[in-house]
Image (spheres, rainbow, N blue to C red):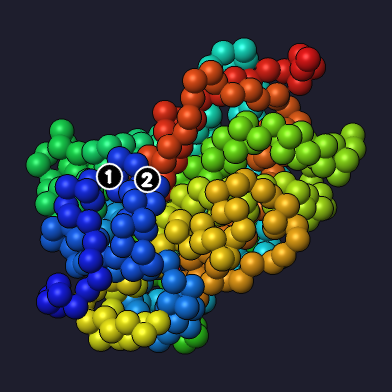
Amino acid sequence: MPPSATLPPGPNLFATFDFVRNPFRFLDECARRYGDWFTVRVPGVSPFVFTSDPAAVREVFLGDPDTLHAGDANRPLGAFMGEKSSLFLDGAEHLSQRRLLLPAFHGERMSAYADTMRTAAANAIPSWPLGQRFPIHPQMRAITFETIIRAVFGFQNDAAGAELRALMKQLFDLYSSRLGTLFSLPAMQIDAGRWSPWGRAVRLTRQIDSILYAEFARRRKEGVEGRADILSMLLAARYEDGQPLPDAVIRDEMYTLMLAGHETTAATMAWVINRMLTNPNVMERARAEVLSVLGDQQLDSSHVGKLKFVEAVINETMRLDPVVPNIGRGLTKPMTIAGRQLPAGVTIAPCIYLIHRRRELWPNPDQFSPDRFLETRPSPYTFLPFGGGPRRCLGAAFASYQMKIVIVEILSRVDLKPAEGYTAHATRRGIAFAPSEGMPAIAKPISARE
Ligand code: HEM
């Protein structure tokens, strides 16, 4: 471990607890006290050197992936995903696996998922309680969960699909609970029987694995021609030497896509709704755009690219409320980043949240103003809700596409009002930071608008 004297100063352990309780407040306070660079230490984990310097971000994104290991930095995220999860791999192995996943997530493929995404939202929204306070965030999780089950796993409503849904839901509810937050600590990864949290996770993954492996075998036998889901694409994919992906690798990637894909997108949509509720003029402009793009038609893929203002609202929300507030790269060698020497063994952590609030990059940074995204296109080193470089989020196009579709369905089906007395702050849900208390709101039928 490097001598701590070489690292920038930072908060003590007591102050660092706030990162779990109120992460955005914690980061604001660190920036105020220490400036663009600070070190966060957690016992048993290598020090995190946070930076909000865009020059550092650029060097990290363009740097040598063999020196900047994202896999090492991501490892605490969830051991049950398995060693071959693309989140945890580095070097050549990461690159070759990512290459096989990329085609399934290419922007041009998204129209194949439009109907699944729309149906998941259209089926869920009519069940929302009307006229009373209810939490929106769990509803967003249900929609993104169902979308991943159908578009990524390709499961329908048959017996295997129903069982997989039930088990996956239990696993990810556990992971996203307060106890699950502690799963990132190796000391918590002890199987003390089925009543211990980790023991429960282990048993659930065994049950899920047996459904998945049976499904892989079935699809390999019957063939996957004509199927558009991502699991089927992976079953058909071949490495450069012509070999198929082993089942164990596909299994790890399926858990990864569920973990990386559903909490993040759901939390972001909850923040988008929160921002629209606190800026009713923005909500009205977004609804007007939806009405003018759709006319009296049902939404389909031809409409999605025309929703420029809705897209700007989502981007502006991701600027101010990034659900992944920082990324990490573990240094395998000493490295000088933006003129600062850092020793091997530390994790350099570009801070998305603080970069998105820099005054010289974003005039009136605290003001919610979607128009700024209509006027200019920010650089990948100043707007990075999906990270960047060779590790940029694989599901960025998928998430952006889905968020537009779900927001359209909400705006065209219900009128949302703020819940009295509610002010959101960020709270950790699995790998994402979501608005507190499940983001309560009140839904009214569109026709009941004053
Ligand atoms: C609004 C929603 C989402 C946000 C904000 C988000 C954010 C991120 C971030 C910040 C990273 C780390 C990037 C880096 O280290 O530079 C990441 C990685 C990743 N994300 Fe997402 N994500 C979202 C949705 C999704 C979806 C829908 C999927 C797939 C269905 C997905 C799959 C992945 C994968 C596989 C990685 C690892 C990429 C790699 O290491 O090569 N994400 N995401």
Mark 1 touches mark 2? (CB < 8 Å):
yes
Q: Which residue is mark 2?
A: 25
Q: Which residue is mark 1?
A: 18
Q: Position of residue 404 (x, y in %)?
A: 68, 47
Q: Check disc 1 and give the amino acid type.
A: Asp
Asked if ligand 1 lies within 8 A of label 2, the reply is: no
Decide if residue 207 is in sight here: no
Q: Position of residue 156 (x, y in %)?
A: 56, 41
User: Which residue reaches farthest left?
Assistant: 192
Asked if ligand 1 lies within 8 A of label 1, the reply is: no
Element type at mark 2: helix
Q: Position of residue 288 (x, y in %)?
A: 83, 37
Q: Position of residue 21 (x, y in %)?
A: 30, 40
Q: Check disc 2 and give the amino acid type.
A: Arg
Q: In the displayed structure, does residue 416 sit left or right of residue 268?
A: right
At a point 22% along the width and 48% down the height, the residue shown is: 15
As displayed, is residue 300 above or below residue 375? above
* Tag shown at residue 422: none
The N terminus, quarter of image: bottom left
The C terminus, quarter of image: top right
Bin the neighbour count of mark 2 within 10 Å (Cα to Cα): few under 14, some 14-19, many 20 and up: some
